[in-house]
Image (cartoon, helix red, strand yellow):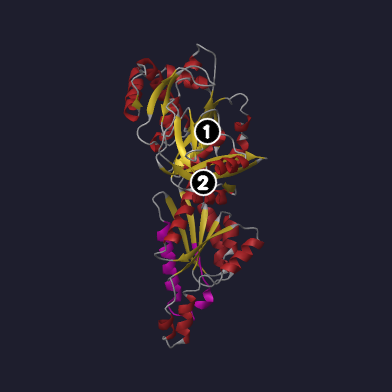
Amino acid sequence: MAKIARNSLKVGLFGIGLDAYWPQFEGLEERLKSYVGVVEDKLKRDHIEVVNLGLIDTPEKAVQAGHDFRAADVEIIFLYVTTYALSSTVLPVVRRAGVPVIILNLQPTQTLDYASFNALGDRTKMTGEWLAHCAACPVPEIANVFTRSGIDFHQVTGVLNDDPIVDSAIEDWIEAARVAHVMAHNKLGVMGRYYNGMLDIYSDMALQSAAFGTIIDIIEIDELAAIRENLNDHQIDAMLTRIKDEFDIQPDCSTAELHRAARTAAALFEMVERHGLGSMAYYYESTAGTVHEDIITSVILGCSMLTASGVPIAGEYEVKNAQAMKIMDTFGAGGSFTEYYCIDFNDDVVLMGHDGPGHTQIAEGKTKVRPLEVYHGKVGAGVSVEMSVKHGPVTCLSVLEIGGKISLLVAEGESVPGPTLEIGNTNSRYRFPIGARQFVEDWNAAAPAHHCAVGVGHIASRIEKLGALLGLDVIRVC
């Protein structure tokens, strides 16, 4: 099967200045170029390539820079304002490149040394020093021209060095760009069909591809059955060993059920590799006593393992939530399949979970495997996962699809200790700063599907930036 070629994220950088200044103020051009180098160092990451075009100081250079960025296939541009510069040295670059632009309004020092400045005694030197600090000056002009040109822009304002607010914002923008890049190169497998009558999860896959760039690959369960049938004992035993290592197997789990789950898990891993999938959504019921029923009632362990391995898998054919889980996982937050089902008004917490799959890498302790005599609302029986999300900060994300438009719904809260239901499902207790009652009402008001993805850490600001880069509205509940 064809796989998507690996491409690195390319980030564009250019500084702006005014060529008329260079013969007037000795050393100014070199000084500002060195500042561009400082910014380049801030952008460098192992997983990205920085395309630095240096200091652009004329409209003619700006036109060429636009061509260069376009040829380099950059996906985001950081525009570093070093001093006053004409908007005509900016617009041609960004207009032709056609990618999101972040204006870096960064001055070289926290404050001016007024006494030293005024003691220079040479007004030409004083003006040159002033120009080296007036990064803020042309930003209104640039904003005006971008707005009149229909170009969205974003800003980071602060100090070039030792400014944690600046460094954090740059990190967030780069991470958002990286996630957008991964989503645009992701292949989402869909296998089976929708859960009958669950209207909220029905999805427009073309719209998902348009919003995120995702490729949709329709997978036949017959293929999974064929892979599973042709596995050898070594492959199954190796997967069984891995299951015993990764999970806390409860004593009432039968050897036969674990073997069945291991066989299906091995087949799932091979199918994902064969198709080059980065995520998947599935659901199936089949008929009692068939091989397909045998498969679909033994997928939870394999799907949980894949989810924890960077291939998030959403049950009930919830494509939107597979997208949300992939976003969360790519941000490094995990992204476990969940829904809320009850409120503990005494403790002011929302109880959330699902019958799997779970993201075992973000579990509080080792994930348990328990046998279930029935999968509620579904066919058959088998083993399932029981886990709670790590105690501490969490973020919930839902991908909305309403009125032919994709948007993102996000909330930050805390996973807190306390009693949970030991029923072989994922179960966690979440506390939100606006309270359980208000959270549920505000979340419902946005009209999401009933599933969402939950991950560790507070990353709503990064999700908001991802929405900005993709042109998607982001609704933040808390």
Seen from the viewer's position, the closer of residues 203 and 18 is: 203
Q: Is residue 32 magenta?
A: yes
Q: Is residue 469 left or right of residue 27?
A: right
The three-letter code of the residue at mark 1 reads Cys
Reading the image, the residue beneath label 1 is 342
The three-letter code of the residue at mark 2 reads Ala
Against 345, is 22 above or below? below
Q: Is residue 27 magenta?
A: yes
Residue 79, x across and y down, in percent: 51, 62
Which numbered disc covers residue 200? none
Seen from the viewer's position, the closer of residues 356 and 262 is: 356
Reading the image, the residue beneath label 2 is 180
In the picture, residue 204 is in which quadrant?
A: top right
Q: Residue furthest top?
A: 289
First reached walking from the N terminus: tag 1 or tag 2 = 2
Distance from disc 1 to disc 2, alpha carbons, whole Å, reads: 33 Å
Badge 1: few (under 14), some or many (20 or more) residues near its Cα, within 10 Å? Answer: few
Q: Residue furthest right?
A: 403
Residue 81, x across and y down, in percent: 51, 67
Residue 188, x across and y down, in percent: 52, 34
Q: Is residue 278 visible?
A: no
Q: Is residue 318 left or right of residue 112?
A: right
Against 167, is 472 above or below? above
The secondary structure that dominates the magenta segment is helix
Q: Is residue 111 visible?
A: yes
Against 337, is 158 above or below? below
Picture mark count: 2
Residue 234, x across and y down, in percent: 33, 20
What secondary structure is marked by label 1?
Answer: strand
**Which residue is found at the position 42% from the left and 77% from the top?**
27
**Magenta span:** 14-43
In the picture, residue 142 is in which quadrant?
A: bottom right
